[in-house]
Amino acid sequence: MALLLLADPSEDKVRSSLAGSRCFAAFRDGVVVGACVVQPRGAGVHELMSIAVLPEHQQSGYGTVLLQSVIDCFRASGASQLEVGAGTFGYQLAFYQRHGFRVASIDHDFFVRHYPEPVFEDGIQHLDMLRLRLRY
């Protein structure tokens, strides 16, 4: 749970995303250093609910390997697209875009409506969520 909370500060949201989801993990020397949760949305569509890498292993390629493994897994299974929500700025947005995800829509005030406490990154409050999509 502590690892997944790095990607989403709401334990309730993380726990609710686990039911019916597939979980993936990255290991180093037998220790989990990264994890992600993918939830089916129906008709070949899956949503990446969270992806996180331990801080001491970030910028080491584990997130990239983990995301690429998820993309490859669902592509091979015949899925038509993978979706993810991200803030309108920050490293997560660039990370997903580097892997071919494109903005599909904006969920205005998402972080205000769904989190009891403001969510900040680099001193800036997240307000809106971008919905990104990778089509196969």
Image: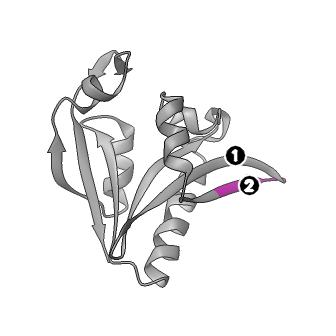
When asked about the image quadrant of residue 112, the answer is top left
Q: What span is colored magenta in the figure? A: 25-29
Which residue bears the numbered disc 2?
27
Q: Residue at x 62, y 33 (%)?
A: 55
Q: Earlier in the sequence, mark 1 or mark 2?
A: 2
Residue 33 has which mark? Answer: 1
Residue 21 seen in the figure: yes
Q: Main secondary structure of the magenta part?
A: strand
Q: Amino acid at mark 2?
A: Phe
Residue 7 has which mark? Answer: none
Calculate the distance from the C-alpha at mark 1 to the C-alpha at mark 2. 5 Å
Q: Amino acid at mark 1?
A: Val
Q: Is residue 15 found left or right of 116 in the rendered image?
A: right
Q: Nearer the viewer, residue 50 or 15?
A: 15
Q: Which image quarter is the C terminus in?
A: bottom left
Q: Residue at x 32, y 76 (%)?
A: 43
Q: Is residue 51 above or below residue 134?
A: above
Q: Is disc 2 placed on a helix, strand or loop?
A: strand
Q: Is disc 1 placed on a helix, strand or loop?
A: strand
When asked about the image quadrant of residue 127, the answer is top left
Q: Which image quarter is the N terminus in?
A: top right
Q: Residue at x 74, y 48 (%)?
A: 32
Q: Nearer the viewer, residue 121 or 23?
A: 23
Q: Is residue 124 above or below residue 69?
A: above
Q: Is residue 40 found left or right of 98 in the rendered image?
A: right
Q: Position of residue 98 (x, y in %)?
A: 35, 57
